[in-house]
């Protein structure tokens, strides 16, 4: 697994750009975020975390993937903020947020989310998570069930066996690594720190999460497991396992899309998300 992560890091940081032949191979830029109704920073667990809030109504927290930032959610904020209070959080060390010397872990990032919710006086919220954000959502559903309403978890895994072994050589993931490095330099208060961030996050991917079937069956929140039919990072059979194991969970397969379906086909992604959140 360590060799896999090292190879993945090299591919992400050094690979040359390539033209996409299919939609599921593309990486469209996210729609711009609208001006937030409120934004700021919260000090939590030794880090300073950026948040942005949009719209009004029942709260929904959006949790982005590893190495990315909340800017990936532009299309989803536009769809959700018409009837919801949408809260974005840049994960520790990502985007505009800082981190301390603690190793990355999903437990720590879940605690960070609770800290931001506490500061914003949000007792309970629905969650939409992508990749690492979806894993953080699962962590919250297991360990802080009173804070979670409904969970839309896209591209999640519950242990490292759910990762595809060929991800290290995937060209789309390589291009994502390049884009993420550029976005980090633009947004971060430590613009030269992307290599350290990538090393820390990839170290977490190599060993975490480690949730058992027993952990998953204890989830009581309504959950949708969303998976794309060309996901470069997560095995389809693992998504099927999650949906089969979490009580009453639903499985949605997004067609002609990949690990970046919320960018490649925001209309279908948003329709599935809104159908789950707004029509129980």
Image (spheres, rainbow, N blue to C red):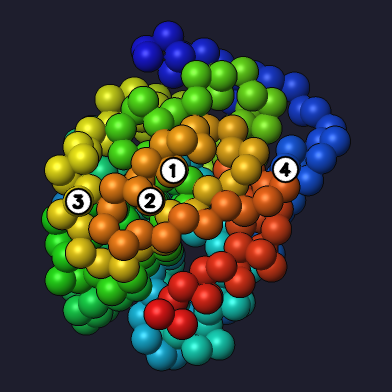
Residue beneath label 4, please? Answer: 24
Q: Is the Cβ of the residue at disc 1 closer than 8 Å to that at disc 3?
A: no
**For this view, does 57 lie left or right of residue 166?**
left
Q: Are marks 1 and 2 in contact (CB under 8 Å)?
A: yes
Residue at the disc numbered 1: 239
**Which of pointers 4 and 2 lies earlier in the amino acid sequence?**
4
Q: Secondary structure at mark 4?
A: helix
Which residue corresponds to the image point at 68% horizontal and 20% vertical from the top-left? Answer: 15
- Give whichever of discs 2 and 3 has the lower sequence position: 3
Which SS class for mark 1? helix
Measure the C-alpha gap from mark 3 to mark 4: 32 Å
User: Where is mark 3, residue-wise?
Assistant: 217
Q: In the rendered view, does 213 fall on the left or right side of 13?
A: left
Q: Secondary structure at mark 2?
A: helix
Q: Dot 3: what SS?
A: helix
Q: Which residue is mark 2?
A: 243
Q: Is residue 50 above or below residue 213?
A: below
């Amino acid at each position: 697994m360590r060799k896999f992560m090292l190879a993945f890091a090299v591919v992400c940081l050094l690979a040359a750009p390539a033209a996409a032949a299919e939609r599921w191979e593309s990486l469209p830029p996210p729609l711009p975020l609208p001006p937030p109704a409120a934004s700021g920073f919260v000090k939590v667990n030794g880090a300073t975390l950026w948040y942005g809030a949009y719209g009004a109504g029942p709260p929904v927290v959006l949790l982005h993937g590893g190495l990315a930032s909340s800017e990936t959610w532009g299309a989803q904020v536009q769809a959700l903020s018409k009837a919801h209070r949408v809260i974005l959080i840049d994960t520790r060390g990502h985007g505009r947020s800082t981190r301390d010397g603690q190793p990355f872990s999903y437990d720590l990032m879940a605690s960070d989310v609770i800290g931001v919710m506490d500061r914003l006086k949000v007792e309970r919220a629905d969650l939409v998570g992508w990749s690492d954000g979806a894993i953080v959502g699962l962590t919250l559903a297991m360990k802080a069930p009173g804070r979670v309403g409904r969970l839309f978890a896209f591209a999640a895994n519950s242990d490292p066996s759910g990762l595809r072994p060929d991800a290290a050589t995937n060209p789309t993931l390589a291009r994502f690594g390049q884009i993420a490095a550029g976005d980090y330099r633009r947004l971060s208060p430590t613009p030269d720190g992307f290599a350290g961030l990538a090393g820390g996050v990839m170290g977490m991917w190599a060993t975490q999460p480690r949730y058992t079937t027993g952990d998953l069956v204890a989830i009581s929140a309504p959950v949708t497991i969303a998976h794309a039919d060309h996901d470069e990072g997560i095995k389809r059979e693992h998504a099927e396992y999650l949906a089969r194991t979490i009580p009453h969970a639903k499985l949605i397969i997004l067609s002609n899309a990949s690990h970046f379906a919320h960018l490649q086909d925001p209309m279908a992604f948003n329709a599935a998300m809104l159908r789950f959140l707004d029509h129980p």
